[in-house]
């Protein structure tokens, strides 16, 4: 899942370590989130959105997978 975490973190002048402390996760988790190697749990996604004072949809970009057909 794509996200805007790196951009939002930079806008708030936070390092990965500082963001990790605020989220109570490791710096490696923040790195994995930013690079799209890890999808957060729902509680963590909401925590990120609250921290950045954004809607969850403004932090995470939902992209349908190849196996998801559009409903007619």
Image: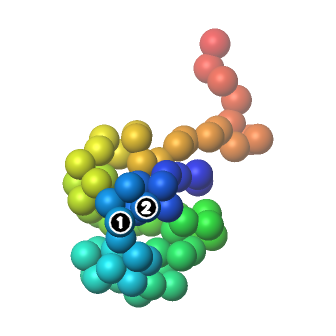
Query: Which label is found at residue 28?
Result: none
Please identify the residue farthest to the top as the structure is shown.
72
Disc 1 packing (10 Å; few <14; some 14–19; many ≥20): few
Residue in the picture at 23% in, 48% down: 53
4 left or right, relative to 55: right
Residue in the picture at 48% in, 79% down: 29
Query: Which label is found at residue 10?
Result: 2
Above or below, 4 relative to 70: below
41 left or right, relative to 70: left
Disc 2 packing (10 Å; few <14; some 14–19; many ≥20): few
Percent across and percent down for residue 39 are 52, 64
Residue in the picture at 53% in, 43% down: 61
Above or below, 24 relative to 61: below
Percent across and percent down for residue 22 are 25, 76
Q: Is residue 66 visible?
A: yes
Q: Element at badge 2? A: helix
Percent across and percent down for residue 2 are 58, 51
Separation (CA) of disc 1 from disc 2: 5 Å
Residue in the picture at 52% in, 68% down: 33
Percent across and percent down for residue 49 are 30, 53
Applied colour scheme: rainbow
Q: Count up the numbered dots.
A: 2
Please identify the residue farthest to the right as the structure is shown.
66
Q: Quadrant of residue 65?
A: top right
Q: The C terminus appears in which quarter of the rendering?
A: top right
Judging by the rendered image, the residue that carries numbered circle 1 is 13
Q: Element at badge 1? A: loop
Q: Is residue 42 visible?
A: no
65 left or right, relative to 25: right
- Are the residues tagged 1 and 2 within 8 Å (C-beta)? yes
């Amino acid at each position: 899942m794509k996200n805007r975490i790196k951009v939002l973190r930079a806008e708030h002048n936070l390092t990965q370590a500082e963001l990790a402390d605020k989220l109570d996760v490791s710096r490696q988790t923040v790195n994995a989130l930013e690079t799209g190697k890890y999808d957060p749990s729902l509680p963590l996604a909401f925590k990120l959105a609250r921290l950045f004072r954004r809607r969850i949809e403004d932090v995470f970009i939902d992209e349908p997978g190849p196996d998801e057909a559009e409903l007619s």
